[in-house]
Amino acid sequence: MYPVHMQALRALVQKRVLGRTGAVIGFGLGLLATLPAPARAGDVTAFVAIPSPAENWEHGFGAALSSTWFNVVTFEGEAARIPGETTDTGMSSFTASALLSPPVGALTPYGGVGVGLFRQNVGSDSDIGRLKAWIVGAKVKLGGLVVLKAEYRRLDLSGTPLLQMDSRISAGAGIAF
């Protein structure tokens, strides 16, 4: 509450216009009035991805579902599919991420970590393992509903993967809810 509100409540209590109960209710309503408007809780985005090293992979695609808490922490679940150079080569991944995402107007820069599983296949060979990701990116909300997203992920695949992938750049669009 602002000082002017406190002075007005104090004056009303001293003149016995409001009792203590009325002052408490007035103070509570004053606090509620100062809260910011509720933020969007999350978004669903679809994206295209460019993995590195590029000689092993084609452009991929995926989708992510995110939920923002306290307007600064985002939890995200993502599924991605990256095809290899040949039709019998590819990688699927599923990642859960925790991100710090303080909004700056319509722009929300973010960064954090992710863990998950991946499955690679090359011909009849396949490999399933764990992945770790360092993530940085930004989202822009247009009109409160449309979300544009760009990010960089530094990947660490467990064991000896069939094909190396050390990073990925992606860009996508979606809707906020």
Image (tube, rainbow, N blue to C red):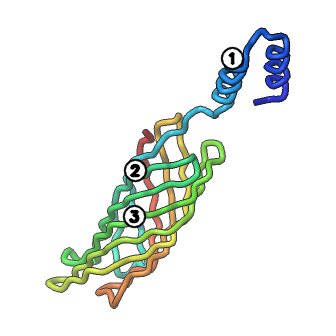
Residue 130 is left or right of residue 14, and the answer is left
Report which quarter residue 79 is drawn in: bottom left
| Residue 100 horizontal/vertical position (percent) | 57, 59
The mark nearer the N terminus, 2 or 3, is 2
| Residue 138 horizontal/vertical position (percent) | 56, 56
Residue for badge 2: 45
Q: CA distance from mark 2 to mark 3?
A: 15 Å
Residue 173 is left or right of residue 27, and the answer is left
Label 2's element? strand
Check disc 1: other Cα within 10 Å, few if <14, some if 14-19, many if 20+: some
The residue positioned farthest toward the left in the image shown: 124
| Residue 15 horizontal/vertical position (percent) | 84, 11
Q: Nearer the viewer, mark 2 or mark 3?
A: 3
Label 1's element? helix
Where 37 sits versus 90, above or below? above
Q: Nearer the viewer, residue 41 or 86?
A: 41
User: What residue lies at 66% left-to-right and 27% top-to-bottom?
Assistant: 28
Pointer 2 with pointer 1, Cβ within 8 A: no
User: What residue lies at 52% left-to-right and 60% top-to-bottom?
Assistant: 99
Q: Nearer the viewer, residue 39 or 29?
A: 29
Q: Nearer the viewer, residue 121 or 98?
A: 98
Pointer 3 with pointer 1, Cβ within 8 A: no
Q: Amino acid at mark 3?
A: Ala
| Residue 54 horizontal/vertical position (percent) | 41, 77
Residue for badge 1: 22
Q: Nearer the viewer, mark 3 or mark 1?
A: 1
Q: Nearer the viewer, residue 177 or 53?
A: 177
Q: CA distance from mark 3 to mark 1?
A: 48 Å
Residue for badge 3: 96
The mark nearer the N terminus, 2 or 1, is 1
Q: Amino acid at mark 2?
A: Thr
Q: CA distance from mark 2 to mark 1?
A: 48 Å
